[in-house]
Amino acid sequence: GMTSVQAARRMADLRATGPKCQRATNTAQQVEDASLISGLSGAVALRDVAGVRRAISAGADLDQGCPWNMTPLIIAAALGEVDIVKLLVDGGADTKAIAWRLLPFERQRLGTASQWAQRLGHNRILAVLNG
């Protein structure tokens, strides 16, 4: 087996090769908290259509996925926010982006926006994504 030091190094390697987050924070929890309150992802999480529009107009990165590569589009699809999904798709967001959860020794696939919509029964969003 691995020593705890080796395991910690492995985690650091996985994090380093995972999606780049703009915020330098100490823990995954802080990254998660920050992503919910800032920028485009924050506006999506708050279901704030006007805020999403403003962020897109301001040139926000539509595919910034942090943490776990949960892109704004994936978050919107999971929340069932049809209007926000439309705005992001029209803006050119990557509909094929895949969210991953980084576990100590593996990456667990969480799926694309379409897969989230399908899993949660958001059929109108599926129609937009498969347009």
Image (cartoon, rainbow, N blue to C red):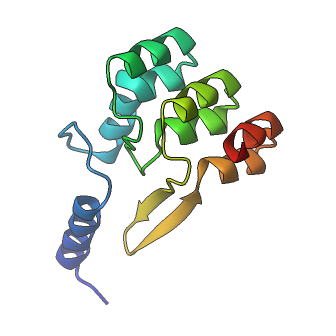
Q: Residue at x 57, y 58 (%)?
A: 110
Percent from the top left, x then y, of residue 96? 54, 54
Would you say 87 lies left or right of 22 here?
A: right
Q: Residue furthest bottom?
A: 1
Residue sitting nearer the eye, 26 or 50? 50
Q: Give the tally of numbered discs.
A: 0
Percent from the top left, x then y, of residue 89? 56, 35
Q: Is residue 64 above or below residue 88?
A: below
Q: Residue at x 22, y 38 (%)?
A: 22
| Quadrant occupied by the C terminus | top right
Would you say 110 lies left or right of 129 here?
A: left
Would you say 45 lies left or right of 62 here?
A: right
Q: Is residue 51 above or below residue 18?
A: above
Q: Residue at x 54, y 38 (%)?
A: 73
Residue sitting nearer the eye, 71 or 68? 71
Q: Residue at x 38, y 75 (%)?
A: 105
